[in-house]
Image (cartoon, grey):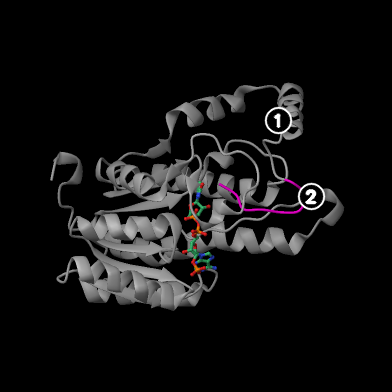
Amino acid sequence: MGARRSPLLWRTWISGASSGIGEALARELAARGCRLALFARREAELVRIRGEILARRPDAEVLVQPGDVTDRRRVGEAIRAAEAAFGGLDVVILNAGTGDSLFPDRFDAGLVERITRVNYLGAVYAIEAALPGMLARREGRIAGMSSISAVRGLPGAGPYCASKAALSTFLESLRVDLRGRGVGVTTVSPGFVRTPLTDRNRFPMPFIQPADRAARRIVEGIRRGRREVCFPRRLTIPARCLRFLPAGLYDWLMSFAARKGYSKAPEGGGEG
Ligand SMILES: NC(=O)c1ccc[n+]([C@@H]2O[C@H](COP(=O)([O-])OP(=O)(O)OC[C@H]3O[C@@H](n4cnc5c(N)ncnc54)[C@H](OP(=O)(O)O)[C@@H]3O)[C@@H](O)[C@H]2O)c1
């Protein structure tokens, strides 16, 4: 095992651990000796993942915590149960997320509400529950799964982009507020990762990468105490440059990309 895969031994809580990046994070962290609390709605999937981890590493400690991140009380209960089982939490990974397309002819505020509650408020509820313990011990790290989509409003993806932008901005404020208090904040902004969420996309996804590779990059970023983990660079650097384009030029470029098929089709899809 090289330096990149050194043991970590974190006591870790992960939301959205039942598939995709969350599942890959659980496997990567378990392989590195972390104790895990896995939170998501699909209990059967969490049980399957725990079974697979234990088959490889019988000494692993894996708590299965079924629940919905939009349920503030349940999120609080789960985090307190994980703290009690492990004697505290070193890392909390706010990974649960969802996405769907929204177009003007079928505008639905309910969809915006649902995505906001999962991607943004769900993370806020977990922060509310985890912060007191971390502040009391003056150590810990909160890692939030934002997205490259947070940089600007992408066509057909308003609810998703806005929820991720809200999360990124919130985590940035929190990071500054926590300066000197022993608790770090990492904002993770990946490009496209192959998961059930992106399997639904019908448009080209440049530089898409497997979930296990994404998980390794995220864990390494957390280990190094990075404020931001953005990858792959060949996508995230140009995407970040979009921020500096004037609105007119941005609109023209996005319309061009949509005409070329680099965008959501009105029949719906996942995000990334
Ligand atoms: N894949 C990408 O290209 C990409 C890129 C950038 C950012 N991200 C972000 O990465 C995170 C993981 O996404 P993924 O691609 O791995 O998708 P995924 O395979 O669909 O995983 C989403 C996870 O979130 C959980 N989840 C959804 N709604 C939930 C709720 N209300 N309560 C609790 N858990 C909930 C799901 O579990 P249950 O259904 O069992 O609840 C699942 O475990 C998301 O925040 C996503 O926005 C993904």
Residue 112 lies left or right of residue 105; in this view the side is: left
Q: Which residue is mark 2?
A: 103
| Amino acid residing under circle 2 | Phe
Measuring from the top left, give residue 93's x and y in whole percent.
38, 57
Q: Is residue 21 above or below residue 67?
A: above
Residue 17 lies left or right of residue 89; in this view the side is: right
Alpha-carbon span between mark 1 and mark 2 = 16 Å
User: Please, what secondary structure does the residue beneath circle 2 have?
Assistant: loop
Q: Which residue is mark 1?
A: 257
Neighbourhood count class around disc 1 (C-alpha, 10 Å): few under 14, some 14–19, many 20 upward: few
Q: Is residue 93 above or below residue 224?
A: below
Measuring from the top left, give residue 201's x and y in whole percent.
62, 49
In the rendered image, is residue 66 in sight? no
In the rendered image, is residue 228 in sight? yes
Residue occupying image coordinates x 63% and y 50%? 160
Residue occupying image coordinates x 56% and y 53%? 199
Quarter of the view holding residue 120:
bottom right
Magenta-tinted stretch:
265-272
- Of circles 1 and 2, the one toward us is 1
| Amino acid residing under circle 1 | Ala
Picture disc at residue 12: none
Quarter of the view holding residue 200:
bottom right
Residue occupying image coordinates x 60% and y 28%? 243
Indicate if the residue with disc 1 has its beta carbon within 8 Å of ligand 1.
no
If you read the primary sequence from the N terminus, does the residue marked by circle 1 or circle 2 appear first?
Answer: 2
